[in-house]
Amino acid sequence: MSSEPESASSATAGEPRQAGPQEVTQLLANWSQGDPTALEKLIPLVYKELRHLAHRYMEGQRPNHTLQTTALVNEAYLRLADQSKPNFTNRSHFFAVAAKAMRQILVDYAKAQQREKRGAGATKVELDEAALISPEQTSAILDVDEALEKLAVLDSRKARVVELRYFGGLNQDEIAEVLKISTVTIRRDWVFARAWLYTELHSAA
């Protein structure tokens, strides 16, 4: 199965129409059931949303972050598309998995940069060399990841809520759908987790 991000990128060049959540969910279901044409239809729709998600995360990090966004979304797309047996229940589930993939890509890349800086020999991470992130970004990504790991020990659900919001860009209703809990609970978890992370990150500064 071909899953080159270039083909997905070129497919989005013509600004395809915006698909509704139900259509994306149906295409995901068809793909999970082995329909190859579903993936062909899904690529431009999902790639565009993945790019928007990556852009939202990278926004404000550095003015010339276009290549960073492209590299991040291409790598996330490849990881998501390169599955022999995809099993996505709905659109929210797909982007929840995308959130985890983007977090891991960024953390792996930041750690590799740190090892290279220390002369320890960085493990290769599949991101374009043009997508180098700044030392400030490297530190921030690792700080957030470390804080999330600590929060996960304290309360794994709250850490998952942050991951879905911070890395995945999901709203409260979408997170509630993924975690199968009420929106009210998500709202409470987010308020607590945001305050906890603020304290943790600033106390470590």
Image: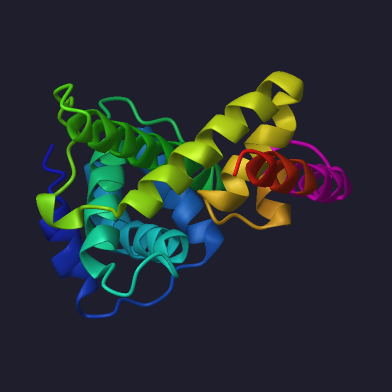
Foreground residue among 47 and 28: 47
Residue found 57% across the figure and 51% down from its top: 166
Residue found 86% across the figure and 46% down from its top: 188
Image coords of residue 16 (percent x, y): 31, 76
Magenta segment includes 192? yes
Looking at the image, what colour scheme do you see?
rainbow
* Magenta residues, start to end: 177-194
Magenta segment includes 169? no
Image coords of residue 70 (percent x, y): 24, 60
Q: Is residue 178 left or right of residue 57?
A: right
Quarter containing the N terminus: top left
Relative to 60, residue 37 above or below = above
Image coords of residue 195 (percent x, y): 79, 48
Residue found 19% across the figure and 59% down from its top: 8
Foreground residue among 86 and 69: 69
Q: Is residue 179 visible?
A: yes
Residue found 55% across the figure and 58% down from its top: 22
Foreground residue among 113 and 118: 118
**Majority SS type along the magenta span:** helix
Q: Is residue 34 visible?
A: no
